[in-house]
Amino acid sequence: MFNHKTIAENIYYVGVNDRQKTLFENYIPIPCGVSYNSYLIMDEKITLVDTVDASMVNTYMDKIRSIIGSKDIDYLIINHMEPDHAGSIGLIAETYPHMTLIGNKKTFSMLDGYFHTTNPRITVNEGESINTGKYTISFYMAPMVHWPEVMVSYIPEIQLLFSADAFGTFGTLDGAFMDTQLCTQKYWDEMRRYYACIVGKFGKPVQMALQKLSGLSIHTVCPTHGPIWQRDLAHTISLYDTWSRYQAEENGVCITYATMYGNTQLLAEAFAEGVIDGGINKISIHNASLSNASYILADVFKYKGFAIGGPTYMNECYPMIENIISQISHRGIPDRLFACFGSKTWAGGTLKHMTHMAETLQWQQVAAPVDNLQGVKEDDYKAAYEAGKSMGLALKALE
Ligand code: FEO
């Protein structure tokens, strides 16, 4: 019942779309769904590359069987052990007990923690290869893109790379899996959000992997999520390069605020008006109580300017703002222009956390923090407007 379309001669897509899950890793919304990509190489040795989330194992096994029939699988290459890809290893290994598992030393130490398998194993090191008949498959380590055991697999004969999470994105594959067939417009924002949330902390390891891969001639990239890249490959690599260098894509500002009774929101509005009058109109405003942190993080990667505001809450940060500060700090995003504003009714507390984040990340503060007491008065509104204008002017000066 399945259409057997190939990526290259004897290489099949056997991944699945997840349209059921609402939260990836149980905290990141995926309104466009996600695909778990797996690949089957029907060479003299039948080789599977990665598996899928355990929740989709039945469809996955049906797809594999529709191609291999009653034959055995000879090899399973495990590029990444996170359960969205490794979740079906236990069942596949049990179903095909003679299948040889291929991974590196770290792969197998994780595998033994998740599964009890008695299948034969081949432990591969950097640059080593196996032969499947017509094809050679070479292995290159890509630690911390996204976990320490991650490796990528490369077929030199057709210049095809199985890239694990690298170059992946949220978003299901609707009717096709090759970028040459899909309208890829819907993926770019989701790819940024995927990158910011999943890989955003690991800029240096991504840069090291890109450096390593630059020595290979690559025509096709098969990631573990999202489209297979050929037509848009150069654009995809360029985006990953920009994000892993933490370079902003747009000379604009992300304004993130939280508000309890509307006062901090007024400051955010005033700040945005100032940004416009400073000459910048690329503005993304998030109410942190409504926008999931993943969308805010994506915009911190996208824009050069970042402003944050919120009320003092129990002498500290408002919870949603504390979460945003923590998530940005964990990713160590450098080189942004920064401003902050806050509201309080008696004692303050939130601004010190905001400025501490900016100082730790060595961000350039373009204006003094705006410290509002109780209701927003004309002076407070004007101070937030002027801070926004300083941000706009500072961004404009970069053009
Ligand atoms: Fe898609 Fe790190 O797993």
Image (spheres, rainbow, N blue to C red):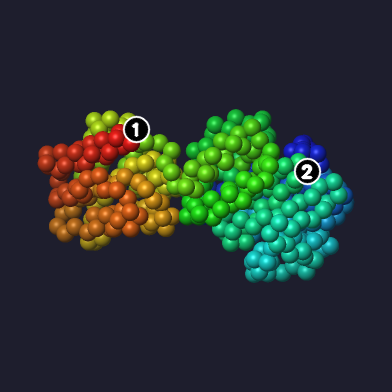
Q: Which quarter of the figure is the N terminus placed in? A: top right
Crowdedness near tag 1: few (<14), some (14–19) or many (≥20) residues, C-alpha within 10 Å? few
Q: Is residue 30 visible?
A: no
Q: Position of residue 224 (x, y in %)?
A: 64, 48
Q: Position of residue 98 (x, y in %)?
A: 84, 62
Quadrant hosting residue 172: top right
State the separation of the CA atoms marked 2 and 1: 45 Å
Q: Position of residue 264 (x, y in %)?
A: 23, 45
Point out which mark residue 341 bears.
none
Q: Amino acid at mark 2?
A: Glu
Q: Nearer the viewer, residue 301 or 6?
A: 301
Q: Amino acid at mark 1?
A: Glu
Query: Where is mark 2, residue-wise?
Result: 157
Query: Where is mark 1, residue-wise?
Result: 399
**In the image, residue 143 above or below residue 301:** below
Q: Nearer the viewer, residue 170 or 249?
A: 249
Look at the numbered disc 1 and give the secondary structure of its residue. Answer: loop
**In the image, residue 321 above or below residue 93:** above
Cβ of mark 1 under 8 Å from ligand 1: the answer is: no
Quadrant hosting residue 17: top right
Mark 2 and mark 1 lie on one chain; the one further toward the N terminus is: 2
Residue at position x 59%, y 36% in the image:
234
Residue at position x 23%, y 36% in the image:
389
Residue at position x 18%, y 53% in the image:
344
In the displayed structure image, the side of residue 202 where residue 399 appears, left or right: left
Q: What is the residue that sits farthest to the front in this orientation?
A: 215
